Amino acid sequence: MTIRIAHLDEADHGAWLILARGYKAFYQTETSDAEYAIAWRRLLADDGIHAFGAWVDGRLVGITHYLFHTGTWTQTVCYLQDLYVNPASRGKGVARALIEAVAASARTRRATRMYWLTQAHNATARKLYDTMAEHRGFIRYDFPMDEPSA
C-alpha cells in the first residue's frame, strides 16, 4: 500500500468534508455547515491554518490541520490541531505519515516544538502517539468564553 501525502485542493472538498465531519463526530463537537465552509476556505487560502491529506489508491483517507504560533520562550511552535483517518484505513501507517508531514513542515519553518492534544480515552491513537512523541503529563482546561459584546 502506497500512501501519498499532499496539500488539499478544491477538488478534495467533498472527501475532506466527510473526514472532517467524522473527526468532529468522534470528539462530539457540534459544527455548523457555515463553520465547515469557513474552515475549508481558510485551509485552501493558507490563512494561518494548513492541511495535508493522505491518499491511498487515489482516495482521500486521512486529513490533518495544523498551525504555527509564537510562544513566550520560542519564536515558532507548531500545533497539530486535527488528525483523522477513515476507520477502514487505520493501522496502516496513514496517521504516522500525516504526523511526519506536519513535522517536516515544522522543521522547514524552524519550529522549536510541535505538539498535539487528544482525549485520554483515545487509546488507539495514543498507542501510536506514544511511539512518536513524549506525553509530558499536562492536563488541559478550557475556560468558558462569553460571546463578544457588540
Image: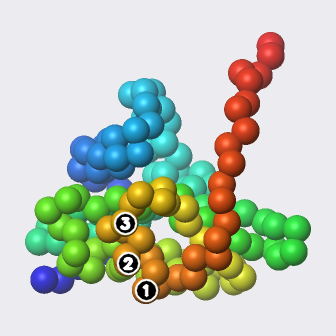
Q: What percent of the width, then of the height, locates residue 49?
A: 57, 56
Q: Nearer the viewer, mark 3 or mark 2?
A: 3
Disc 2 crowd rating (10 Å Cα; few below 14, some 14-19, many 20+) is: some
| Kind of residue sitting beneath label 1 | Thr
Q: Which residue is mark 1?
A: 131
| Circles 1 and 2: CB atoms closer than 8 Å | yes
Residue 66 appears in which quarter of the rendering? Answer: bottom right
Q: Amino acid at mark 2?
A: Leu
- Quarter of the picture holding the N terminus: bottom left
Residue picked out by circle 3: 123
Q: CA distance from mark 1 to mark 3?
A: 13 Å
Question: Nearer the N terminus, badge 3 or badge 2?
Answer: 3
Q: Is residue 99 above or below residue 50?
A: below
Residue 122: x %, y % from top left: 39, 60
Name the secondary structure under disc 1: helix
Lateral position of residue 136 relative to residue 21, left or right: right
Residue 112 relative to residue 8: left or right:
right
Q: Which secondary structure, mark 2?
A: helix
Apparent side of residue 111 relative to residue 53 in the rendered image (left or right): right
Cα–Cα gap, marks 3 and 2:
9 Å
Image quadrant in which you'd find residue 40: top left
- The reply to whether residue 60 is in sight is no
Let me know if residue 138 appears in the view.
yes
Identify the disc placed on residue 128. 2
